[in-house]
Amino acid sequence: MRLLVAVCLFSGVLCKNEPPPTRESLLEEARARILGWYPDKKVTEAPNIREGIKVSMLKKDQECGGNNVPVTFAEFDIPAVRPGDVWRTMLETQFQKDWNPQAASVAPIGKWDERGLRAWAVVFELAIVSNREFIQWQAADADFEKQEFWLVFSTRQNEEVRKLYPLAHGAIDSQNCLGAYHITKTPSGVHVVVTQHVNVHPFFPFPLHAILHFLPMAWKGTLDFVHQMSGRAKELSTAGAPLNASIAPAFMLHQSLAEAQRIRKSTKVTFACFALKGVFARLATWIIVKNQTAEEALLWQNQYKGHTSHAIVKIMDGKVAEWFYAWMPITEWHKGAIAAKVLEEFPNIIGSIDAVERKESNLQWASEFGTSPETLEKVITSPRLFESTIAPSFSEEHRVAFSALTVSAVVAGAALAFGSGFYLCRSGEDNNGICNDDDREIESAIE
């Protein structure tokens, strides 16, 4: 396999008989590029450096999307964060719209357990030109003891995925043949090396190897993304978010089911629930309950669902709070009041109320918190308790969620910065229960 990958890459063409991608093949290729190509001065150009960020390219362009385009590298440090915070920042795509303004939307397409991969359809908004869509595979690796992490993204051989998800209206089909992050620990924080191999099919030719010299916006996009990603990682670090294998699905890290369950159960998860009644702020009534189990929080949610403003916060190990779900009617001041009340209770809460408002797919009670689906199914379907409510489904399809493509384009279609994004569900498209039929955005957490 290693020989085949090397021959394909350095020949500048895509091998026609290349086997389907797997977790191992994508990780192998990522390591070859970051640990092999990048340090080799014989094959890489001298780096451009600004604000401590190094950007360089492979001297010889490689084929991607039908054209020979540059393979880029970026290297930088992030102080005062943990490696896992950076990894989690890029892994948890459901929160990326909170910190990455270039991220437009993402749609989960599916997961391939036997190959250790999941797939996503990602759209980026580019200045002046049309949006670019990437149909990509994602692979991951994590060594929590050494604090060394990898993320890999690839649009290569995505035909089977494309059949499941047609091109978004108005978007240009684009490629990132190999994007990867290598994240390691330093004495003062984190060291990151990123590689990208992007073809966004620019509408006019441009000398991409000289883009950092001629287009300041190319640097701006890279600098902005690094600062935005660093800010999110620092938010996670300040909150003390847990870093263990429960962050990623077991099939992506090749864990046994027993080990995955053990890790999940070792993290104590409770819920805090907030409800607000009243038309006028001065006459409003608060209902707040804390230290709820998954079953208790689900019972509580069904009491207010569809008619009373409410929000649910997930708390891990008694100290790390994350927005979990929110529902508001048209009374806009309710949203601000609940957001303020929750922030008062949990000043370092992760995420935002906007990211979870009416996101039914966030309600993955059973899959995330060690509660058996059978137990919750009994709670949900009890006619005595909920005769008029609609309960969330626990089908396997609902456990599909999002990943992190690492591409952000520079002006005129060149791509040197690194980001991730979200898709909007198309009107009327059910997508196996993942997307709502009113075109609400889906930002679910993968199991």
Image (cartoon, helix red, strand yellow):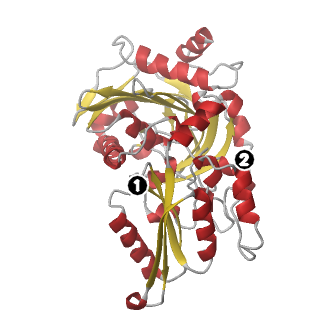
Residue 2, relative to residue 222: is it above or below?
Answer: above
Q: Is disc 2 placed on a helix, strand or loop?
A: helix
Q: Which mark is residue 396?
A: 2
Residue 31, relative to residue 409: is it above or below?
Answer: above
Residue 378, relative to residue 339: is it above or below?
Answer: above
Residue under the point 30% across and 35% down: 212
Residue 324 in sight in this render = yes
Task: Give the mark nearer the N terminus: 1 vs 2.
Answer: 1
x and y, in percent, of residue 177 in the image: 55, 30
Amino acid at dot 1: Ile
Q: Which mark is residue 350?
A: 1
**In screen coordinates, is 395 left or right of 274?**
right
In which image quadrant can residue 84 be found? top left
Residue 431 in sight in this render = no
Residue 211 versus residue 328: which sits nearer the camera?
Answer: 328
Amino acid at dot 2: Glu
x and y, in percent, of residue 123 in the image: 54, 50
Residue 11 versus residue 203: which sits nearer the camera?
Answer: 11
Q: Which mark is residue 324?
A: none
Residue under the point 23% across and 33% down: 52
The reply to whether dot 1 and dot 2 touch (C-beta < 8 Å) is no
Residue under the point 73% across and 77% down: 388
Q: Quarter holding the C terminus? A: top right
The residue sitting at the left extreme is 51
x and y, in percent, of residue 395 in the image: 74, 51
Residue 255, relative to residue 441: is it above or below?
Answer: above
| Classed neighbour count for the residue bearing mark 1: other residues with Cα under 10 Å, few (<14), some (14–19), many (≥20) | many
**In screen coordinates, is 79 left or right of 135?**
left
**In screen coordinates, is 55 left or right of 135?**
left
Label 1 to label 2, Cα distance in Å? 26 Å
Q: Quarter holding the N terminus? A: top right
